[in-house]
Amino acid sequence: MTAAGLRLRATAGSEWIKFRSVRSVPAALLATAVVVVVGGLLVTAGFRSGWSTMTASERATFDPTFQSLHGVELAQLFVGALGVLTVTGEYTSGLIRTTFAATPQRAQVLAVKGLILGGVVWVLCTVASFAAFFAGQVVLTAPARHASLGDPGVLRAVFGGGVYLLLIGLFGCGVGALLRRTAAALAALFGIVLVLPIAVALVPGVLGARLNEYLPSTAGMEFWTVVRTGGDALGAWPGLAVFALYVVATGVAALLLLRRRDV
Amino acid sequence: MSTINPSRRARAVLASEWIKLRSLRSMRASLAVTAVFSVALAVLVCSNWAASWSGLSAAQRAQFDPTDTSLNNLQVVAVFFAALGALMVTNEYGNGLIRSTFAATPQRGRVLAAKAVLFGVGCLIAATVITVAAFAAGQSVLGSRAPHAGLGDPGVLGHVMGGALYLTLAGLFGLFLGAVARGTAVTVSALFGVFLVLPILVNSLPKDALWRHTVPYLPSNLGVGLWHTHGQFFVGPWQAAAWLAGYVAVIAVVSTVLLRGRDT
């Protein structure tokens, strides 16, 4: 094996140990999976119990897939925080100095961190998305409408729940590497993902709607939406592309800064 | 050795907490960002209403309320106050200072109470300034092109002050939750979940009997009851204030009990 290959394997090994040995990680992952399923159940049960009070147009635009995946919106808090902490935790404890002394290829360290976090989050959240989808469709008994995996766009949307959370986790890693402080990085991440869409939605008219569709989380959510009601929506794949672009840009900026900055 | 006079101890605890509060660099910066965000968003929202007013239908105009429009940024600003409150406590756990604090004052409940009093009073002042400024800025932008309100109009001052009360209670909610959870990441994530995400999930559900008996009692929706003038589904202001204060009191008791039984 070449020296570069050996180094990569050693970095992956040490990053994996760090990832799984932080006590809060299994707790956050468990919370993520629970929240995806429970959030979806809460929302679908609410629609099922209130179905008779809904108007005809509300019923026509009801998206059983999207609503059963709504727990993803809660879960992004845990996944995002996990992404941030994967990086900032090492700055807080000072371990980052040891890490970079052992592996001066800093970009490699960050990339491996992202890969490990991303892999675990993607597998777990995809499984949780499917569980939430099936649980939600069981809850949505007639007369409420429900969806099945064979319907157009549904399989993509259910996979979309896992992909969206994967990107949120990587976004958190990138923001964490840029800002290096837990509180600041969390505030920035949640500010962008949660606060901006609400703030922009308050602006009436075309300006608000136009701005909103290009925000990272709004664009990313398109990928797990099946029924689109408004005209101002990017659509599934363009939405995913816009969201991914934000994440990649943040990652590249983090990699570049990481190499120039002191630790 | 003589016993320490309790009032002297209380003064000492308050003084040390006050030094920590005012010397925390991030506190002042975060507060400034919050104020700028609130006023800027009020101006942005109101200027868009003013610009589009002439093209609006009668139904859209009937929906419009100038006070609500200038204050609706509070649904986001509340989470900033809550996060600031959380940092008051979790910062000290993060840098280890909490061990010195509790070594100096083993009466842990009193330390938490001192933090809450100082932060609560500071919050109330800052929140009043922010809500009045957001209201005034919003109304001046609405100006002549759209209907606007004044602080003297019936009910308006109550809702502006209701907004300030909401921000203060949100701050204390965060502070006590921080004392329960102790970690910055956990507390801040939970606060964003409670104040921002939960309402997104459940507010749009069909409004059946179950909804009407649960959803309006979420902290964020109680907040809406405090500052919003036309809340059809929301709890009235006095009741909302009582419920919110009740939530804060419950977490305060839980955190005090936990704090006394736990290692630092």
Image (tube, rainbow, N blue to C red):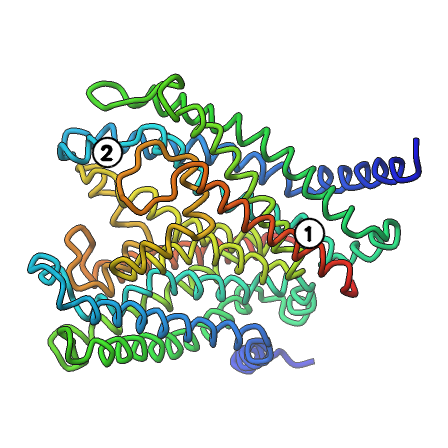
Q: Give the letter of the chain under mark 2.
A: A
Name the image quarter holding residue B23: bottom right
Amino acid type, mark 1: Val
Earlier sequence position, callout 1 versus callout 2: 2
Q: Taking the image as drawn, is residue A249 in sight? A: yes
**Disc 1: which residue:** A87
- Residue B72: x and y in percent read 28, 64
Under tag 1, what secondary structure? Answer: helix
C-alpha span from label 1 to label 2: 41 Å
- Residue B78: x and y in percent read 38, 63
**Disc 2: which residue:** A61
Q: Nearer the viewer, residue A122 or B131?
A: A122
Name the image quarter holding residue B133: bottom left
Specify whether B237 is left or right of A78.
left
Work out which quarter of the rendered image holds the C terminus of chain A and state it.
bottom right
Q: Residue at x 36, y 23 (%)?
A: A152
Amino acid type, mark 2: Thr
Q: Are marks 1 and 2 on the same chain?
A: yes
Q: Give the letter of the chain under mark 1.
A: A
- Residue A172: x and y in percent read 59, 50
Q: How many marks?
A: 2
Q: Nearer the viewer, residue A34 or A159?
A: A159
Q: Residue at x 64, y 40 (%)?
A: A25
Under tag 2, what secondary structure? Answer: loop
Q: Taking the image as drawn, is residue B162 in sight? A: no
